[in-house]
Structures are given as C-alpha cells and as structure tokens.
Amino acid sequence: MDTKLPPYATFGQRVWFYGFRVLCGLIFFFLIAPIIIIIPLSFNAEDFFTFTPGMLALDPEAYSLHHYQDFFGEDGYPWLGLLIGIVVGAVLTVILKLVKGSLNLFPILIGAIFGLVIGKLTGLEGEEWMTPLRNSLMIAPVATILSVGFGTLAAIGLSQTHVPFKGAIMAILISPMIVPLIISAAGMYFFYSRIGLQGTYWGVVLAHAALGIPFVIITVTATLVGFDRSLTRAAANLGANPVTTFFRIQMPLILPGVISGGLFAFITSFDEVVVVIFVGSAGQQTLPWQMFTGLREQISPVILAAATILVAISIILLATVEMLRRRSERLRGIAPH
Amino acid sequence: MSDATQDGPMLAADGRPLKRSLARALRAQKLRALMLIAPLLIFILVTFIAPIVDMLFRSVENQIVSETLPRTVVALDEWDPSDVPEDDVYAALALDFYAATERREHTRLGSRLNYETTGMSSLFRKTGRGVDDIGEIYTDQFVDLNERWEDPLFWLPLVSDSGWLSSRPAEGEDRPLSLFRIDAEFEASFPRAAEAYETFARTIQQTDGDDPAEEEPWHLVYAALYHDLMAIHESGAGAEGLGRFDGPVFVEALEAVPGFETQSYRAAFEDIDEDWLDLEVWGTIEAFSDPFTAGYFLSSVDLQLTPQGIEAQPEDQRLYLLLFWRTLFMSGVITISCILLGYPIAYLLSNLPTRTSNLLLILVLLPFWTSLLVRTSAWKVLLQQQGVINDILVWIGLVADDSRLALINNQTGTIIAMTHILLPFMILPMFSVMKTIPPSYVRAAKSLGATNWTAFWRVYFPQSIPGIGAGCILVFILAIGYYITPELVGGRTGTFISNRIAFHISSSLNWGLAAALGSILLAVVLVLYWLYDRIVGIDNVKLG
C-alpha cells in the first residue's frame, strides 16, 4: 500500500484508501478507548460507572477526587516522606556535582517521589488499598532482582557458541511464559504446601521470580544477538581478566536489555493475580488481588482510581522500555527501523 | 606450529595432538556455558518444573484408600464381586475403621470416595459415629465373667513385648514412651486379638499420646479374643495349647466362650447402616484400593470407574467434555477475531514510514503493558447494562432503554474482552514478519498487470502467513489457559476449563480432579508449544 494517494487515483481507489484508514482507526480506537475511558470515569463524583449528565456538560461539580482519596486512605505521612526524600535527593545531587562536575536535578525528583511513596506506605495499618500496594511493592522488586540475576547469567551462557542441549534448556526456561497460569498456580499450590512455602512471602517471591525469568531471557538474549565477540577478545588481548571484561565491556552493552528484561519481570510480578491468589495468603494480598476481589464481589468506583494509577505506571514503564530499546540499537550500531 | 608433512596426527604448539587440544578447549567452553546456565536451570526446576511434576503425580495418586483401610484392602483381594463380602472382610473393616475414626481420617476418605459414588461421605460419617459399639456385646460378657478383663494393667503384661515393657519410663520420669510392641508368644496363640490390641495401643499412642496402661482396650479387642478362643476351642487343643497363658482367667474364658451370645461383624455394620450390604459401596472401595488410579482422568472426560468397569457418567453429571469443547471453541473464536482485527493493523504499520509506524505502534504497546486487571475492569465497566456502551446505543436509538443488551456475564463478554487483551500478541508477530516483506514483489506483480486484489492475495498474503501462524498459536495458547478474564466477565456460560480447575482447588477441594484437568490442559498447551517451536522457534519470540 502506498502511503500517499496518487493524484490519478480512481474513485474506487480513493474509497478503498480512506475506507482502510477508517477501519484501522476504528481498530486502534478499540485498542485504546477502553483504557482511556476509565480515566475520566475515575473522577466521577457519583458512585456510577458511566458518564453522568453533569460530567457530559463538563460541570466541575460532577468531577471529584474522592475515589482517589479512598484509594490513598488517611494514614501514612507523605509530607514528612516527601521532605526527607527531597533532602536525600538534594544531598545526592550535591555529591554527584562534586564527583562528576555536572549539575543534575534528576535525583531530587526521584528522591521526592520515593520519599512520598515510602512515607505513605510506612505507618499505615490494614488500609483497604494501601496495604495491598505495599505488599505489591515488597514482592515485585525482590522477584525482579532474582529473575534478573539468574536470567542474565543464563542468557550470557546461552549466547556462547557451543552450548549442549541448547534447545531443551531454552524450552524449559521459556516454559513459565507458555504454561497457563492456572496450571502453574495449581502445581505451585500443591508443591509449596508440601514444602511449607505456601502462604509465605518467600513462596510468592519465588513463584513470581520463576514467572519473570522468560522475559529476562528473551530480552537479554536479543541484545546479545548482535554482540560483537571481537570486543571481548580485544579486551582479553589488552590484558583484562574475564570479570573485568564482563563489567567493563559486555555489561554496558547489554545493560539496556537487562533493564528492559527487569521491567518486564517487574510488571509481570506487579500485575500477576492467579499465582498469588493460590500461593499467597491474606498477608501477601497484592494490589491486583485486591482489584480482583473487588471486581468479583462488590465493584466499587475506587477500582477505577486504582486502574488509572496503574495505567500511569504502565505508560512510564513503556516509555522507559522504548527509550532503552532505541538506545540499545544505537549502541550496537543497528539502525532503527 | 607443527609440520603438516610429518607423519602421525597434527600437533598443537605444546606438542599435544591438535584434535585433542581443540576438543579440550571446546569442552572447557561448554562447561563454562553450562556453569552460567546451571543456577537458573536449578532455580526453574525447583520452583516451577517440580510443582508441575507434582501436579501430574497428584492426578493419578490415590493412596488414601490403601492407607486408611489397609487390612480391608488386603481382605478384599479374594472378594467375589457378585456377593456381599465374607465376615472376615467386615472384621478387617471394623478394625481399620476404628483406627481411622480415632485418627479422624474416616471423613477425609469418605469425601474422597464421594467424588466417585455419591452417598459415601454420609455413610462414612455415620459409621464413624457408630463404629465404637461394634464388639461391645463381647466386652460385657468377658467382664461379667471376670472383672479383671476390664483392667488395662491386667492386659499390659500379658500382651506386651518384655523389652518394651522394661523400657517404659518409671513413675515421675520425664521420657517419652516408645511405640508399643506386641509379645510374640501372645501373637502366636491369639493372632486376631494381638493384631487388634497392637492397633489399639499404637493408635492411641500416636493420635493422643495416651498410654495403653491407662486405657481400657477397644471392644474390638474383646471380639477378636472371643474369635481366637473359639478357634482354640473348636480345634480341641484345650488349655494346654495356651502356653504361658494357661492361667485360671484364660481357662475360665476358654470354657465359657461357647455359651457366649454372638453378633457377626456383618450384622454389626448392617445395624449402623444397611448400605454396608450394598455391592456398589464395596465395589467402589475395591475399585479405588490401588495406590494409583485413572479415576480422576476418567472423571475429566465424563467417564467413571465403576465395579463393572469404565462407564459414561450419568447424563446430568457430564460437564467436562462440554467445558473443554467450549474452551477450545471460544479460544478459536477469539483467535479468529484477533486475526481479523490484527491483520489490517499489522499491514498498515509495516507499510507506513518508520516514524509514523513507531508512533502508532505505541497504541498497540500501551494495552500490552497495561495491567490485565485494568483492562478487564474497563470492560466490566463498559459492558454493563447501565454502562457506557449500552448508554451510547440507547442514546443513538439503536436499542430501546428497556431492552439493553446483555454484553457481560456471558460468552459475548468473554470474547470481546479477551480479543482486546490478546490482540497485541497477534499484531506484534504479524508486524515483525510483514516488515521483512519487500514491497518490490507487489509492485512487480502490479506492473505485470495484476489487479490490486490479485497482487495482494497471490503475492503479499502468502508471504505474511508465517506471521499469522505465529500470532495464531501464541494467541490460542494464551487463550485456552485464561482464568481471570472469564472469571470476571464470563458469568455462567462464558467460563473456561481453568475456572473449573480453580473451583476444584479452592472450593470443592477435589485436588486430584483439578490436577487431572490441569494435566490434560497442559498436554494440549505443550503440543501447541512444540508446534510453535517448530514453526517460529522459541528463540524468535519478540517482546515489543
């Protein structure tokens, strides 16, 4: 298909050209609209799941933040956390300034955000939404570290030229992505009950780490595909030992892949419901679990506020992964396509 | 470097044969690669593969019958299934049941057998309440004869192994009692009573930590003793055959037993529940007495194991074939709708300039990155009767306000929501294949006189088929295992086999059946996975 309609196009060609674009537009609309539409609905002042006449008339009275207030609850000390976060960020900035000589305000911002989150999550008890969020934030990063650590090592091993049983090993390592979650959940529930991990924090972390590994393997091996072996040979030739070679030559090149693999693993754990329901107990209730319970029992509009926040998080993660992918392709000399 | 013209194998610089040196280098390389992979491989094997294997094992495992009723299972070996079992089977059952009730395991076995034959659970519970009366008639007569029969301390020195007796902790000594051992001589003279007493002593020790020296033996011990004494009496051996038990109490009992009032074990069970004379009950126990069973798998395909062999389930209990069929059918529908919606998008993206297509690709990747729960809850909100879509349809006038469409809690809801959720998994593989199709082929076809349609259908489409294949298998694999979305928007008619598996794990607690259903689903997925590997190659999976 040509990207522009030629001036000599017949009427039929014109109809086809625009018709196809309208069709694609509708499909894009189908993809995006359900995600976008819950954002305004989450600001509904009433407990309805549709646009009230007031909202359609853009009446400010019809919009409110009270579902967000319900989501965030009343406990926690975000202002103190924000303050501490900013101070820590500022100290880091000053240190960076002294070390590298360039002024970068990024740490202050990051520090403020982290301070806000940590300040919010400490000092709360049994809040309906904040406790699950805290559980999610305690499970996902640890699971991610495990997946990334084991996964990166294995991906490097798999990218060597002579690996015995490569096909079988790869099939096993990718299988957590392919096996239906309910089967993984059932198997883990039975097995972890036998070995006493069922209903514990570490049971959930190990299960989530296993589920995240395929993503790390796939993204890291993808960055290793174009890896130029002569670089490591050159380093070895110049007298670097394998460990130095790894950290100074290989690691910076595969880092984008490692980070996006880590983000995939993080989002896998952060969004995962089925396994955590079976392997975890009430003490490990995560945010998606709470949403699942909410959707199954009494659906409350706070779910839309939670969903909107999750959409914001996924947009940030998507942007980061895209940025990393382009950077990785640039580093490895693959032209963006 | 060695001289190529010299005789013998080619040598490396250090004088070793080059072939061996290369092999050594290669082995070192292989070993290093494996060392890097090993930690992850072990991790996955323990956290993921072992649970799956455990589940496969659980789908055929059935040790509960032979563990709870060990003697009955052995006694049933010689049972002729056309008639009610002999009294010795009932005797074995009485002892097993007594011990099981003491350990509170009979209800568990009852619920297990209830999966196969309804009514077993209540029968077992009722029997558990009545079983401790069996044999009481004998106890009373022994005690009437001589009050010492009631005394636990009278029994203990008679029946206990002398080593065990002397190892008993003394008064006030804080030391656990070792497990009861029966006296060999007693066992030789009174085999039934010895077995019953040993079961009694060990069971009370193991379940409540009680001491047999303080507990009156079960009625069953007296009943067994009666039968042993009767056997001695009938053999005409007399009191001399009793060995060291020819004391006055035994002699007196031996002389009295022929005049005892009796009750057969079978009659005792009949008193508790007439179902114990039912051949189906015995058939079920017999059929599931093997430590491994195909029963769960048969149930998964609407068959059942009966005493007469494999039969179809009654019409009203057939469920799983329908569910499997529905899962496959709906996954097929979802896959097809994903192809129909995904193909135009992939085509558009691969034919636009890179800058524009990268921008539009974000519209595909955003749903891909958005939480599954978010997307499902969005559809749950949109598709409600009072939701946005019905509101719009009413507002346009397509649908009357009082006949709003039922879009959720049925198959329609599941298909719409899952098509949306899985669409990115179709578009991305298609896009990566279509990107590589050179536009010059279509141009060549057109310049040779093909119409737009012919050029597309004969030249472009065949080249895009690998992308469709990859996307199809991926979407189908993901769809047949879906749990969350059907659970939330599927209602009663739009649920999958996964939902049934979850139900059996958490609500009905029929883990064996859950494992069997899961194993069948897993087999289907693994076949598709193998196909995917053959067609696309797992190395070529791309994420965004």
Image: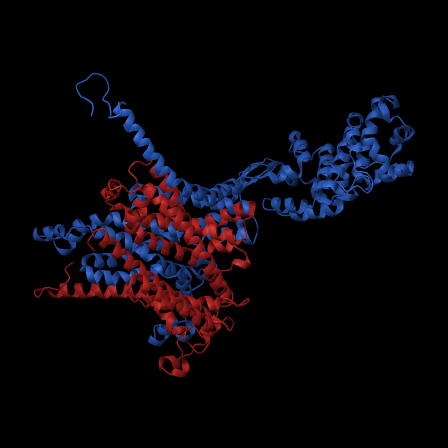
Chain colours: A red, B blue
Q: Is residue B188 above or below residue B273?
A: above
Give how far across and how far down residue A255 sits, in percent. 31, 52
Name the quarter where the C terminus of chain B is drawn.
bottom left
On the picture, is A169 further left or further right than A194? left
Name the quarter where the N terminus of chain B is drawn.
top left
Q: Is residue B480 above or below residue A114?
A: above
Q: How many marks?
A: 0
Residue A319 or residue B399, whichever sits in front: A319
Q: Quadrant of residue B495?
A: bottom left
Q: In which quarter of the image is residue A153?
A: top left
Q: Quadrant of residue B42?
A: top left
Residue B111 or residue B376, whichever sits in front: B376
On the picture, is B111 further left or further right than B343? right
Q: Can residue B385 be seen in this view?
A: no
Give how far across and how far down residue B252 sits, in percent. 91, 30
Q: Which residue, as the protein is rendered here, is positioned at the far top? A: B7
Give how far across and how far down residue B283 sits, in percent. 63, 38
Q: Can residue A89 be seen in this view?
A: yes
On the picture, is A181 further left or further right than B18? right
Residue B270 or residue B227, whichever sits in front: B227
On the picture, is A171 further left or further right than B228? left
Measuring 28% from the left and 62% from the top, which residue is drawn there? B362
Measuring 77% from the left and 28% from the top, which residue is drawn there? B191
